[in-house]
Structure formats: structure tokens, C-alpha cells
Image (spheres, helix red, strand yellow):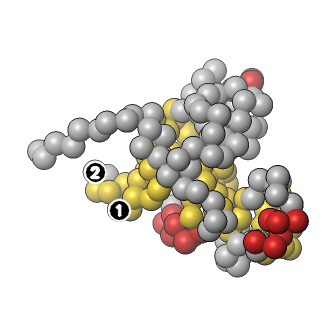
Amino acid sequence: MAKEIIINLGLQTLELYEGKNCLARYPISSGKNGIGQEMGSEKTPLGRHMIYRKIGHKEPINTVFVHRRSTGEIYMPQLEAAQPERDWIVTRILWLMGLEPGYNRFGQRDTRKRCIYIHGTPDSTIIGQPGSKGCIRMRNLDIIDLFDAVEEGCLVTLINEHNIQVTNE
């Protein structure tokens, strides 16, 4: 059975499902500018996506990436102190591609061209509230766990629900 990821921006959570079974639930941090599809907005897109590319397999924890390539650096607080404005993408990257033409794919609303990722972030980064430049940030051990559990092509749906009613059927 195929796995699927549901990212809830309202609750700042990412859940991994296999069928109706929730295999894992992780806290995340989405875009500090809110929700949106537009190029250059630094907002997190909604809708149906898939994992376009997995990057960082077997790299050491805290490996620093720029433009999806390892820089050879390992994140440390001293590195951040020297470059406080840098957007830290570390450990693993799951690059997303929108599946809805005109909404999150093609033109000025293209998730893949916007380089929207699910990625690791330094342990000092606040998780559980918006704070990224549009990507989905996760704790390093969580992104490694998720990265190892999914394949390229895995469906990823981003929603914005604040209250979800759970029913026992």
C-alpha cells in the first residue's frame, strides 16, 4: 500500500499514512509569511503535491545544503553566529512538486520552481509555529525518519485546518 503525507499548516503537523493508518506524526514549521502559491512570496503552498526528489541520502546529520547540494559544511552554532541571516537547510531534503496545474504547478505558482522542500533545520530552530521562507522545516531526527520511510513520487497534501474532528468508526 502506498504511503501518503498530510501536512496541516493550521496545526503545524506532518503525518505519514499508509492507507488509513497513521504511522508517524511530527511537529513542523511552515512559512512565516503565511499560506500562498505565488513565486517570491516566501509563503507555504497548499494542495496536492508529490515528492519530486530525495536529496541527502546517507549524509551526516547537520550537513548544510545550498541549491540542493552539500556545501561540505556541518551546521554548528558558531557557523550560524558568523552568518545569522542564512536560511539553514540541513540533513535531508524532500523536494516537492505541485500536481494541480494553475494552482501549484506551472507559471508563477509552481511549487517545484519555487524550491519548496520538506527539510531538516538546526536543533535551535523553533518548531511548532510558522518561521520558514515557505518550506516545511522539521527536526533533524524526524526528517531522517521520514526520508527513510518514503519514496520519490509519494503523495503530499498540504491543508490548513485548525480543528480536526476525530471520529471512531
Query: Would you name the residue on which mark 2 appears?
Result: 20
Residue 31 in sight here: yes
Residue 52's disc is none
Where is residue 116? Give x, y as percent. 68, 44
Q: Amino acid at mark 1?
A: Leu
User: On screen, 35 above or below 65?
Assistant: above
Instruction: Check disc 1 and report its element: helix, strand or loop.
Output: strand
Is 14 on the left-hand or right-hand side of 50? left
The answer to whether the residues at label 2 and label 1 have Cβ atoms under 8 Å apart is no
Instruction: Check disc 2 and report its element: helix, strand or loop.
Output: loop
Residue closer to the observer: 158 or 102: 158
Q: Amino acid at mark 2?
A: Lys
Residue sitting at the far front = 81
Residue sitting at the far left = 169
Where is residue 12? Give x, y as percent. 47, 46
Residue closer to the observer: 64 or 150: 64
Residue closer to the observer: 81 or 37: 81
Residue 161 falls in image quadrant: top left
Residue 23's disc is 1
Image point (66%, 46%), residue name: 132
Q: CA distance from mark 2 to mark 1?
A: 9 Å
